Image (spheres, coloured by chain):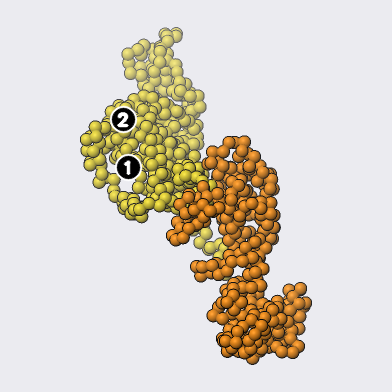
Chain colours: A yellow, B orange
Amino acid sequence: MDNIAGTKSSLTWAVHISVVVLVAMWVLPTLGLFVSSFRTGDQIVGSGWWQSLTTQEQQLSPIRIEGDETETNGAFVIEGNLFGNARTTISSWGTSSREPEAYEPGQTAELGDGVTVTVQADGGYVLSSPVTTAGERLPRIFASATTPPEFTTDNYKTVLFSPLAGQTIFQAFMNTATVAIPATIIPILIAAFAAYALAWMEFPGRALLVAAIVGLLVVPLQLALIPLLQFHNWLGIGKGYLGIWMAHTGFGLPLAIYLLRNYMVGLPRDIIENAKVDGATDFQIFTKIILPLSFPALASFAIFQFLWTWNDLLVALVFLGTGNDQQVLTGNLVNLMGSRGGDWEILSASAFVSIAVPLLVFFALQRFLVRGLLAGSVK
Amino acid sequence: MIAGLERITGGDFSIDGVRMNDVPPAQRGIAMVFQSYALYPHMTVRDNMSFALKIAKKSPQEIAAAVDKAAKILQLTPYLDRLPKALSGGQRQRVAIGRSIVRDPKVYLFDEPLSNLDAALRVATRIEIAQLKEAMPNSTMIYVTHDQVEAMTLASRIVVLAGGGISQVGSPLELYERPENEFVAQFIGSPAMNLMEGEVSGTGAITTIKLKNGGIAHSAVPTQPADQGMKVKIGVRPEDLIEATGDSLYTGEVEITEALGEVTLLYFKKTGDGAQVVGKLPGIRPELRYNTVRLSADPKKVHLFANGKSLLYR
């Protein structure tokens, strides 16, 4: 009975587990990166991103008391709050790193020379001193506190609009878009025409051309980097956007033509013959019949090509300059890793900016991959 | 080849006396209906039907008028704004026909248009095509089919193609009554015509044939005295076999009966030469199974073939 087609395989559970594992492998790091990018550097260092979603108790980094002192009844008093927000609750505090949990909230600590500090549970403090403390180093407060989930968009403001590693991420973002969008559209335009010709037009040498394209699929692009750059220099376009568009187009074309040709060959011959009987020229058949029907293939290739060009570092390093107006996101990230390697909040926000667009593109176009546009044309 | 989708390698093809060998498909004045419908899946019915006219740069009013007219003929008006995938098989086929009607061609080409439909729809659509043909007496329809019922009911002339050539051209009844060769004889009519080997034993206006299986047959096909002793095959349609009282053409034991109500089909046990004989008797006769039945036929209904060709056409 187990072999009857249509009955559930006994290995269904293995499939389910694999799916869950795969989804977790993909979603968890992305989610972690996403959450981290909304936390401050201190939070990232202090606790994992998975803890940031719940209220938690943690040892805060020391906070130095600061503020303007006022004189009342012969005592110099500084009042203020340790935290910017009112939701953090102190469970214990201290004034030295050796005894960070020496006092309960509301207790008063003697610091010698008549100086006293009182810290309330909400972080409010009162520093009282018989002599002025102006010009002196004020004591630091070590506090253990429960903090509700707290997120900030400051990281994004920082990475997008203030120059890090020479340029802002926003500028790098625009540079990458300047590279990736034409580098996606140009090869698709060329490849669609070529694919139609190779699929449906009769001309001598067609089979050889297809074979050549399949051959080009396996040529590694590193082979072509130096000759191509020399060629660009000889042409006089040197390093620049025009050069990288041409390079990405060239590197993407074999796969584009191959994919699209295979898809177009699979379209029903009857439809194309009928269009011929209806009087359509090859160009009309291409634009009015083939292109709309090839939309799923076009979309899937567009996704691939866009992701490649967006995430590309090598080709950009070779064919683009390193100025602020030409450095792409990946290059910027590399620089950030070097210069701001410890600032995880900056790195995570930058990384998320750079993967946001690929994610968006994928989710916007993935339904075209799934939808069968051919339903209903032939039985 | 007629449509111009394949190159003509030999001979001339002309429509209305104009040589069409090198004319592109669209300018031949033809329209084609494909077996698979070949509708454009991303266009609505209206767009499907107007595509050819738009390509021909007709005015929007002209296009709308032609589409509306065709839609009315085919009762497609309520579906004009649907996509093909939202239509049933019969409706899709009507759209495909409508697409050819709007072009008002001289020649319609139908490539097995009904073979994708189920039996009931096939009959209904067949009648629609027949009415369509009557409504447009000035146009020619070339209809390719494997279904002889379609061929017999729709055609004014049938061309039977076999083995890369034309077997016979004629009206449906000509093909049925006077087949030129064994292929046409067996192809037209269901169940197929019985062929039995024999030898001419008497010549004249009525030919007498001594059959290998022992029977004696008479045929109205005339023969000359020189034909005496000639090896021939006689062909008798199952429906022309009648129960014999005297001389029998065939005697055999019935192996299987199929009672269809109006007639009963008798399948006889295979004899020495391996050919199975089928008879068709009126009425319900299942009791004949396992019985020996003697059959004869009207000489006018007995065909004579020698070397595969009918002796009628010598």
Q: What percent of the width, then of the height, locates residue A366?
A: 49, 44
Q: Nearer the viewer, mark 2 or mark 1?
A: 1
Q: Amino acid at mark 2?
A: Gln
Q: What percent of the width, then of the height, locates residue B8?
A: 46, 58
Horizontally, residue B112 falls left or right of residue A198, namely right
Q: Is residue A354 visible?
A: no
Q: Is residue B25 visible?
A: yes
Q: Which mark is residue A250?
A: 1
User: Quarter-wise, where is residue A117 in the image?
Assistant: top left
In the depicted structure, whether residue A331 falls above or below residue A106: below
Decide: few, some or many residues near mark 2? Use Cα within 10 Å; few <14, some 14-19, many ≥20.
many
Decide: few, some or many residues near mark 1? Use Cα within 10 Å; few <14, some 14-19, many ≥20.
some
In the depicted structure, whether residue B98 falls above or below residue B187: above
Residue drawn at x 38%, y 12% is A130
Q: CA distance from mark 2 to mark 1?
A: 20 Å
Question: Which element is circle 1 on?
Answer: helix
What residue sits right under mark 2 in the picture? Answer: A326
